[in-house]
Image (cartoon, coloured by chain):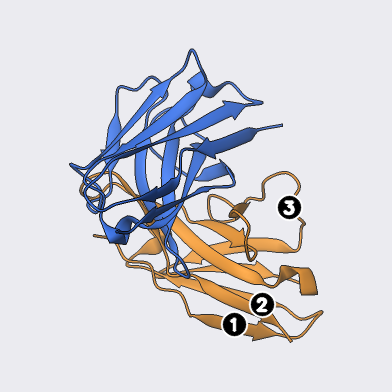
Amino acid sequence: QVQLVESGGGVVQPGRSLRLSCAASGFTFSNFAVHWLRQAPGKGLEWAAVISFDGSEKYYADSVKGRFTISRDNSKNTLYLQMDSLRPEDTAVYYCASDALKYSGSYFDSWGQGTLVTVSS
Amino acid sequence: SYVLTQPPSVSVAPGQTANITCGGDNIERKSVHWYQQRPGQAPVLVVYDDRFRPSGIPERFSGSNSGNTATLIISRVEAGDEADYFCQVWDTSGDHRGVFGGGTKLTVL
């Protein structure tokens, strides 16, 4: 079955960087776009970024554009999110999710369990 | 940017039907997707492309989309359906982006 496992979360000071990873299995990772989404404590869902199946297209939410970078390594079935210049408002559970399409974007048909990022001094 | 509006809460008795709405400008022109999120868990897709169910989702879950309102319909509500529900569309009117409604807490009385 499809499995997505996030890692790399933790506590980080404002202005610092963090890199999240998402290991995929149970499906042909290289055939689908994949996303990062996040959910601040007690809040709703927020889409953050998407990368196409081959990495040729990337889109970002305004809230993370210029600070976060999404990438993928299809040889390792792994998705990444490089987060720079972190702010307290970036505190959230970060989820990776697979798309039903090769390019952006439709719906998020499988989700990982999430990894918590806390930005605090 | 495109905005989706959901009621914060909906309450329904067991065995009744819950209708959770999602409002957006001419939303009928978009494909609407719905997610269920139980406390402490990751979201789960329950309806995609307005009205289709992924495998493993009970037939009690269905959807509709017309005019400015999409609706998630949960028939014969059970206690286990108590959760937060989010609608979502993919917006390409400007940049490409995913858009969520604010979420609706379904309470089973």
Mark 3 vs mark 1, CA separation in Å: 21 Å
Q: Which residue is mark 3?
A: B57
Q: Which is more N-terminal, label 2 or label 3?
A: 2
Given residues B102 and A90, the one toward you in this image is A90
Image location of residue B12, percent across then percent down: 70, 84
In the rendered image of this protein, which colour is used for chain B? orange
Nearer to me, A112 or B4: A112
> Residue A34 at x, y = what percent?
45, 34
Is circle 3 on the same chain as circle 1? yes
Q: Nearer the viewer, mark 2 or mark 1?
A: 1
Which chain did the renderer colour blue?
A
Residue B9, horizontal then vertical, whole percent: 55, 82
Q: Earlier in the sequence, mark 3 or mark 1?
A: 1
Quadrant (top left/top right/bottom left/bottom right) for the C terminus of chain A: bottom left
Q: Are marks 2 and 1 in contact (CB under 8 Å)?
A: yes
Helix, strand or loop for disc 2:
strand
Question: Where in the figure is residue B67, as x and y percent of width and height?
Answer: 41, 68
